Image (tube, rainbow, N blue to C red):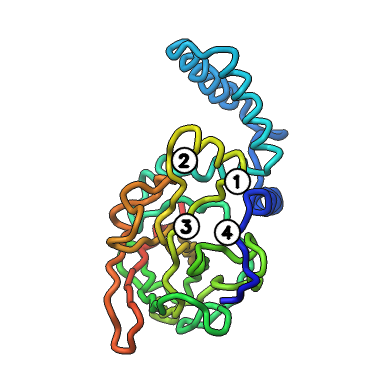
Amino acid sequence: MSETITKATAADSGASATERFLADKTGGTGPGADTARVSTLATEVITAVHEVIRRHHVSYEEYNALKSWLIAVGQDGEWPLFLDVWVEHVVEEVAHASRKGSKGTIEGPYYVPGSPVLSSVATLPMRENEAGTPLRFKGQVTDVGGQPLAGALLEMWQADDEGLYAQFAPGIPEWNLRGSVVADAEGRFEVTTIQPAPYQIPTDGSCGTLIAAAGWHAWRPAHLHLKVSAPGHEPLTTQLYFRGGEHIEDDIASAVKPELVLAPRPAADGAGEVTYDFVLDPAS
């Protein structure tokens, strides 16, 4: 791995995540929004804050510390990080409670659309002599009835062996360990990559200030990110973890589900190998 790669800073990661969110996502509170629902949700959130203040006798000193911290979150560009780490897992749980196919989990702040399109048997783009244990990831995409979904698309992205993401840390090639794999006529795929490392979310910004003040840790377990889609079916956003990995039981983002934990096995060539089949629900 190149010695020019340095640790991603909260400011850099936050700015990148905020810019990416504003470019790729849209909100629902503009013209045409359901004002009654906005009023209900906003009122209940504000009321819940009031109750916390009353129950814990929050002082003006604590209130002003909160104001200062909220301002810093915006200045650091860390709202996507904060919300994706501490809030998104509950939104995902509620949004997909009725899903019959494979389990989903959070997208997180590091997704980038438009990664290079790869064939069903492929190697993710990576640097020469990419550090890390080689990993072969294979499986099949089907519908809930077990029928293969030919040409299903699997967008993959992951951290490298140092826990860093391309486009969110300096010195890494743009599409390193990112790719869009097109499954074959039987919905099958086989991807060669490296096993990602656990990593800490950036701690030198306002989210790190909260973590330190609360005495929490900042670690996420090693995982593969995927978005799986096929015409006529609900897209699936998920993460796959590794049995026995650090922080499986205490992921700071609370995103691990038992159904998403893989059991790597050694392959004949010394690489690790994991298999996971995706089942997509029909579009509603």
Check disc 4 and report the residue beneath it: 111
> In the shown orientation, is residue 251 left or right of residue 78?
left
Q: Nearer the viewer, mark 1 or mark 3?
A: 1
Q: Nearer the viewer, mark 4 or mark 3?
A: 3
Q: Nearer the viewer, mark 3 or mark 2?
A: 3
Q: Amino acid at mark 4?
A: Tyr
Check disc 2 and report the residue beneath it: 91
Q: In terms of sequence position, does the residue under pointer 4 or pointer 2 come before the other?
A: 2
> In the shown orientation, is residue 13 left or right of residue 223?
right
Q: CA distance from mark 3 to mark 2?
A: 23 Å
Q: Residues within 10 Å of mark 2 (few under 14, many from 20)?
A: few
Check disc 3 and report the residue beneath it: 199
Identify which residue, 6 or 42, lies in the foreground.
Answer: 6
Q: Residues within 10 Å of mark 4 (few under 14, many from 20)?
A: many
Q: Residue 103: percent from the left, percent from the top?
A: 36, 54
Check disc 1 and report the residue beneath it: 204
134 over 28 or under it: above or below: below
Is residue 24 among the parts visible in the rendering? no
Residue placed at 65% from the left, 73% from the top?
A: 173
Q: CA distance from mark 2 to mark 1?
A: 27 Å
